[in-house]
Image (spheres, coloured by chain):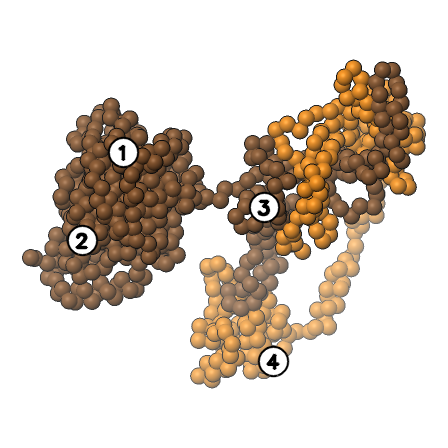
Chain colours: A brown, B orange
Amino acid sequence: MTSLGSQGSSSSSSTEYVVRVPKNTNKKYSIMAFNAGDKVSCSTWTQARMERDMSNRRIYGEEETQEGAAGSEFGKKQREEARRKKYGIITKEFKVEDQPWILKVNGKAGRRFKGIKKGGVTENASYYIFTQSADGAFEAFPVHAWYNFTPQAKHRTLTAEEAEEEWGRRNKVVNHFSIMLQRRLREQERGGGDEDEEEGEKGAKKKKKGGRGGDLRIHDLEEDLEMSSDESDGSNGDDDEAKAKAKKEKGAKGKGKKKKKKGSDLEGFEDSDDGDFEGLEVDYMSDESSSEEEEPEKTKPNKGEDVPKGIDEMSESEEESEEETKNEEENKEEEEEEDGKKTPVQVEKKKKKDSSGESDSSEDSDIEGEAASALFMVKKRTPPKRGGGRGSAGSSRTGSRPGTPSIDNAATSNTLRAAASKLEQGKRQTTVPSSETPAAKRLKMEPSPQSSSGKSTPQPASGKSTPSASDVLLTEDAVRRYLIRKPMTTKDLLKKFQTKRTGLSSEQTVNVLAQILKRLNPERKNINDKMHFYLTE
Amino acid sequence: MSDKGHDVDLTRAKQNTGVWLVKVPKYLSQQWAKASGRGEVGKLKIGKAQGKTVVSFNLNEELTVVDCSGEKISSVRSPREHPFTMQTVGGQTLAVFTESSDKIALEGMVVQRAECRPAVSESYMKLKKLQIEESTKPLRFSQRLEKAITTNYKPVSNHSHNLEYEKRKKEEGKRARADKQKVLEMLFSAFEKHQFYNIRDLVDITKQPVIYLKEILREIGVYNSRGPHKSTWELKPEYRHYQEGQEEEKEAAKME
């Protein structure tokens, strides 16, 4: 049926086409709907792959323990079935037809979409696809199903629990970029050892950039709560460092900048609610007016991490829009910065090989990358101390600076650096002179070539410092340090050298610790019915 | 049964074929399903009137006969004229893909959306009335019976089901105590299959009287009175070895 000529009805010209509804098709037509905002253009696709998403199968499958063998009962299935019938429990079947589609475009590096079936499409009206065939007639095919396709994020996102955690920490955390970094770090560690969420938790609390950890030692950190006995600040500091390292990743990004100021004073408070810190006067903290300065500073360091973020797929990890602007600012600033340290890669290199307690130094190196701009006075945390950030075991980073926000930075850089180095072993580890921009008023920028890896912690100008120790080594020195400071039980010691941080398995840790104790031969004292070890210098 | 992913055939997509997505009323699609031959259902008229595109669909004569359940037949006809309302694709990018038994292909993009509306006419109103009548009928309804049903629940001296049961029981007879060794073998092989057994099931399997069986079980097994496998018997730990070579071990343990 070719199209007829114009019918010539009234003043309009029209053409007639025959409409056919082919009966023989074995092809089922479905609609793939994309949101216009996603800017999907099928013509740009070179290759696409589609498959059903079977991840819901186990919910319906209800695979119980396998038949036979241990743990099974005779006639269990029949009994279960009878029970379900009795109570009228009807489980829905797992229909393959209704499962979502997973569409992968352009291979591994391309986009991923998930297509969820839209219900109720064929109930009251039918959709038909009219295509024009070669002979000018229209062919109509009924639409079998409608799937709404949404793009899937490739970057890592936080789970609900983690998001809750982060939300609780949002006042304390300055460096948002490190959230994802720390998460990644945690995942890596988890791959090797046990999970230790606490770390993050503790770290989170301490995350505040300002005066975290050892420097301020204003109060005993929450870690104390976990110790069997009271801890001195010193031990806190150590803990902090260790934790800070872990936390560094998590929290410290920009956000904390302001909080950092507050944070440093308020360390040791457990969860801080929003209104808690409002009237507090803090020392060494720049007042609000300078917060703007810090903002850009923060962004700068953030920016430094931006790039790594991109690499780390953290670019979208920022939850607040603030972050985005910060990122932009940072990006701009990054250009300004001359320091090569602020390589975004720094974030990745955070992983320090030998992590000692110095969170500070590591942090410093991390942070310094960015803060080159004159806006921020980056407080250079005694980079020289760190020298490579790693090595000085026992040098109390904190000790050197009493509660200056920069300490935080250092701490943060430590943590960040530690985290980065952990993430990628083998990357340059030397600390990068980090231009930390502590929340504190003035940061003097001292680029110190701390991390040779040239990592630059894109720390948000201030308050980013999350004091965190980089990897904690289970060394005799470390143990001696602890025991000198105060008596500890073996349990406490073990807590100090958490498997996550040291990278050893729990068994190994126990063995090594036992050996060290043998060597040290500490004195014993019974406190609260528990055997404590201590050393006297 | 699940396809392990198909490469989507993108040939049509590359040609940028455009299709129309048309929403068609249910009765019309039913009529279309009745089309014969090559599937011609009607004619589509596309024209321009006063600058606007006017699209209308005209249903073929033979397809206007409406099947309706019940007595009325062919008194109602579906309308023939169906103007199309054109809509934009707008906030969605719609693509069409097809699934056949072995492959998935992208057919094209939707360039125009339309709704097929019936031209309101007398016959359409009648059709709608019919539809409404049908849909308002409840699925379940009460029906009055002329005669009461007397074939159920007649009193019986002994039910047939009962008779069968008794006959079966007689045939089986009382369970006899078999050799202890044999019973043990049966038990062990049963416990090889499952770890936990109810006493009833064991009685069925071994066909032994309960008391005798319980004695034997007390020797080699233990009774779980609580826990996830409540009121079940399982083998004693020394007899238990749920791996290969159970038999020998059980035998060895038994000998002790």
Same chain for mark 4 and mark 1? The answer is no
Q: Quadrant of the N terminus of chain B?
A: bottom right
Q: Tell me the quarter of the picture where residue A207 sits.
A: top left
Would you say residue B86 is visible in this rendering? Answer: yes
Residue most extreme to the bottom: B255
The residue carrying mark 3 is A105
Q: Position of residue B87 (x, y in %)?
A: 70, 25
Q: Are marks 4 and 1 in contact (CB under 8 Å)?
A: no
User: Mark 1 belongs to which amino acid?
Assistant: Ser
User: Mark 2 belongs to which amino acid?
Assistant: Ser
Q: Secondary structure at mark 1?
A: loop
User: Mark 3 belongs to which amino acid?
Assistant: Val
The residue carrying mark 2 is A392
User: Mark 4 belongs to which amino acid?
Assistant: Ala
Q: Secondary structure at mark 3?
A: strand
- Mark 1 or 3 closer to N-term? 3
Binning the other alpha carbons within 10 Å of mark 4 as few (below 14), some (14 to 19) or many (20 upward) gives some
| A215 or B46, nearer to the observer | B46
Q: Quadrant of the C terminus of chain B?
A: bottom left
The residue carrying mark 4 is B178
The residue carrying mark 1 is A373
* Left or right side of A222 for B173: right
Q: Are marks 2 and 4 in contact (CB under 8 Å)?
A: no
- Mark 2 or 3 closer to N-term? 3
Chain to which mark 1 belongs: A
